[in-house]
Amino acid sequence: MNKRLYIMGVGWVAEHPAPRRAPGPYIVPDIPAYRSPLGTGEISSRSTRREDLKRGNCREVDPGEFKPMDRESLRALKEAERAALERRRRDGA
């Protein structure tokens, strides 16, 4: 299928050939090396990252399930967790 690209101006329309992709497969570049948040060493490739996540019984967070929090909400959440932990210690659980 041949795609077409149109550019519209005031009182005129021009047709341009659509940009073509280079033939062949798209190769995804590897990720830069970083230290594992799990403390298991350096992550230097996608396969190493997958193995590290599997080893730590973790998974990637889908962007749809991530909800950023502002500092005030995050501070309140940490304070509530700290208070709950202190209550458990005090009650002897």
Image (tube, rainbow, N blue to C red):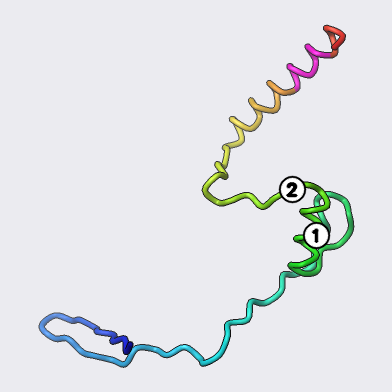
Q: Is residue 10 magenta?
A: no
Q: Which residue is mark 2?
A: 58
Q: Which residue is mark 1?
A: 51
Q: Magenta segment range?
A: 82-88
Q: Amino acid at mark 1?
A: Glu
Residue 61 x/y as whole percent: 63, 49
- Image: 71 above or below 29: above
Residue 42 x/y as whole percent: 86, 62
Residue at 24%, 83% in the rendered image: 7
Residue 60 x/y as whole percent: 66, 52
Residue 2 x/y as whole percent: 32, 89
Local secondary structure at mark 1: helix
Mark 2–mark 1 distance (CA, rounded to whole Å):
10 Å
Residue at 85%, 13% in the rendered image: 89
Quadrant of the drawing holding the N terminus: bottom left
Q: Amino acid at mark 2?
A: Cys
- Image: 1 above or below 51: below
Residue at 79%, 19% in the rendered image: 85
Q: As drawn, is 21 to the left or to the right of 93?
A: left
- Image: 76 above or below 84: below
